[in-house]
Amino acid sequence: MVVLTGAGISAESGVPTFRGAGGLWENHRAEELATPRAFAQDPELVWRYYRWRRELVERCTPNLAHHTLADIESTLDNFLLITQNVDDLHTAAGSKNVLELHGSLWRSRCTQCRKTWTDRHTHLPDPIPACPNCGAMARPDVVWFGEQLNDEILNRAFGAASQAAMMLVVGTSALVQPAALLPQVAKQAGAYLVEINVEKTPLTPISDLFLQGSATQELARWWEENAPGSQALSLHVE
Ligand code: OAD
């Protein structure tokens, strides 16, 4: 089983989605701030945005949907969780085999020597943090619009999608590439596609099962009905 998650899975933990209510920061959209161009023009503004996100996410804990995915992983032999989220809530819930497509809010990276390090600071001493290795300007270790995703992570994600028997897609608008391609690749390769979202998305028409509702409720109910031993899962996975 391969799972793809987006911001909607963390919404009930209190993390605002990007394209929903509360997704703006000081009237800026993510697409305006999460770009190399915005960082080149005003690194302090971009760092303030990410500090705001860190402060916000620091107060959030995993919800039932994150925990259910950790439970599914502990039950199935072959499981990969691919997330577009940078909040680390899947790992906090106990998920182990997690591919972070868009990086992590809790890592920084040097703009010069490219060293990366865990960085859990929310109140940073300087407006723009420096690399502990070479002193150059640091940046959040997240993938910005217009940047390439990590090749190895991308290959693993597409490799898994093309071999999946089932793909579960939870809480993503499916508007941002290349992540939104993963369910299509899985479907084309024969996977059974289950989508959970409060509203329809471009993926809904190709989904085999669309569960409309909140991630916590729908995922927990789906797992209750489909955990090993039940006919539904053995029908689609075996
Ligand atoms: P979006 O904000 O685009 O979409 C969130 C999705 O979650 C929407 O389809 C909502 O309908 C759905 N949703 C909201 N609340 C939900 C709930 N309680 N249960 C289930 N679904 C719910 O977020 P992403 O699709 O994750 O990238 O956005 C993809 C990428 O665009 C992000 O990783 C980020 C963003 O800009 C970068 O920053 C690089």
Image (cartoon, rainbow, N blue to C red):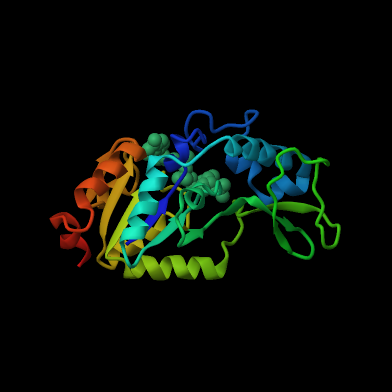
Q: Across the whole image, how many numbered discs are drawn on residues?
A: 0
Which of 198 and 33 lies nearest the eye of the viewer? 198
Judged from this view, the residue extending furthest toward the left is 231
Tell me the quarter of the image containing the C terminus.
bottom left
Quadrant of ligand 1: it is top left
Q: Is residue 132 visible?
A: yes
Q: Is residue 183 visible?
A: no
The percent position of residue 164, horizontal first and vertical second, equals 31, 66
Which of 9 and 152 lies nearest the eye of the viewer? 9
- On the image, which quarter does residue 215 sit in? top left
Residue 237, compared with residue 204, is above or below; it is: below
Residue 137, compared with residue 26, is above or below; it is: below
Q: Which residue does the image show at 21% across and 52% down from the upper left?
A: 226
- On the image, which quarter does residue 118 sit in? bottom right
Q: Which residue does the image show at 65% across and 36% down from the upper left?
A: 55
Q: Which residue does the image show at 70% across and 40% down from the upper left?
A: 122
Tell me the quarter of the image containing the N terminus.
bottom left
Q: Which residue does the image show at 45% across and 36% down from the upper left?
A: 11
The percent position of residue 150, horizontal first and vertical second, equals 57, 65
Q: As drawn, is 194 to the left or to the right of 26?
A: left
The percent position of residue 198, horizontal first and vertical second, equals 34, 36
Q: As drawn, is 44 to the left or to the right of 163?
A: right
The percent position of residue 97, horizontal first and vertical second, equals 45, 62
